[in-house]
Amino acid sequence: MTTTLPPESQPGQPPKKKSNATIVNMVLDSCTFVAFILAMQPHGTGIPIHEWGSVALSFAIILHLVLHWDWISGITRKLLSQLPTETRLGYLLNLIFYIDMTVIILSGLLISKSVLPALGLSVDEHAGPWRRLHGLSADAGIVILALHVAMHRKWIVNVFQRYVWGRLTGQAKAGR
Amino acid sequence: MKWFYRSLLFFGVALLFAAGVLGLNQLGALSRFEMTGRYGGPPTQIQSLSGTAPASDRATNAGSANTSSSSRGPATLSGAPVGRPRGEGGGSFQWAEVGKDLAFVALAWLALSGLDWLASRRADTPAESNQRRRP
């Protein structure tokens, strides 16, 4: 998802609104990334946190998708026409990520020890292919996440330079 | 309200994917992912073997149990698939696994940056050679 950074000041457009959206994206994406890495350690966090945190993570992912609605709908419409190879690859990778996340969450729910029992449902963790599929799809997920992050490295570097490093150094300069 | 409908759409598409996966499971396409035993425990086939059976019978049965488990995919003698699943290594954070995950991200970042650098260098080369040709 190629997201352009808002210019510092653009005539005729409220730059504050755009920069707010960028900050929302940055915070949400950073939290989602950290949550994803933590969700890969069920015994580190404990099973209840792993499961309920993953449910929360799935809502964060849907929010991430909604925030990138323009890009998704725009590329989906233009998919049959001419598009740069990089954009097509990015779209394909994101689609695979979406399917993989669905498999992770579905298989996770089907071997759940905390979420489904809390809803009054019980499942056998070892019945069916779900336990192994959960592990395999999670392993695939980390590779796809790595590629997803790497594809947006320029946006990440720009955003951190402008909104994190820029503000930190700006405050440091102002404090002197 | 627009946001709510959009999220419902993404949720609906995810449900479609989930229905597809459940359908594949119903068709038996995912049976190769089924575990033949529990992690760290004996396989069900060996558990059900009678301890009073003659040694030759036991060996035959154990052999057939191993054959059936290997036909379902790679498995150790205890019946669990080869390799441990994520986070099953103990009761605390597996920092080696966290490091490995972050190393994947760093590797992908470096690889794509390298590809980008190569592509930009390739794009620059004809222009540079043209400039050199100019008097």
Image (tube, coloured by chain):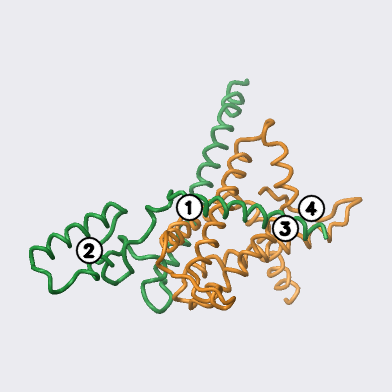
Q: CA distance from mark 4 to mark 1?
A: 52 Å
Q: Looking at the picture, how far across and down is residue A131, in whole percent?
A: 43, 64
User: Which residue is painted at 60% across and 36% down in the image?
Assistant: A85
Determine the colour of chain A.
orange
Callouts 4 and 1 in the same chain: no
Q: Amino acid at mark 2?
A: Leu
When the figure is inspected, residue A100 is found, relative to residue A46, above or below; the finding is above
Q: Amino acid at mark 3?
A: Leu
- Residue depth check, mark 1 versus mark 3: number of the one nearer the observer: 1
Determine the colour of chain B.
green
Q: Could you say which quadrant of the image residue A81 lies in?
A: top right
Dot 1 and dot 3 residues touching (CB under 8 Å): no
Name the residue carrying label 4. A7
Does residue B134 appear to the left or right of B31 in the view shown?
right
Q: Chain of mark 2?
A: B
Residue A138: assigned label: none
Q: Chain of mark 4?
A: A
Callouts 2 and 3 in the same chain: yes
Name the residue carrying label 1. B26
Does residue B131 appear to the left or right of A109 in the view shown?
right
- Residue depth check, mark 3 versus mark 4: number of the one nearer the observer: 3
Name the residue carrying label 2. B77
Q: Amino acid at mark 1?
A: Gln
Please rate how many residues cluster around mark 2, counting C-alpha atoms within 10 Å: few if below 14, some from 14 to 19, many from 20.
some
Mark 1 or mark 3, earlier in chain: 3
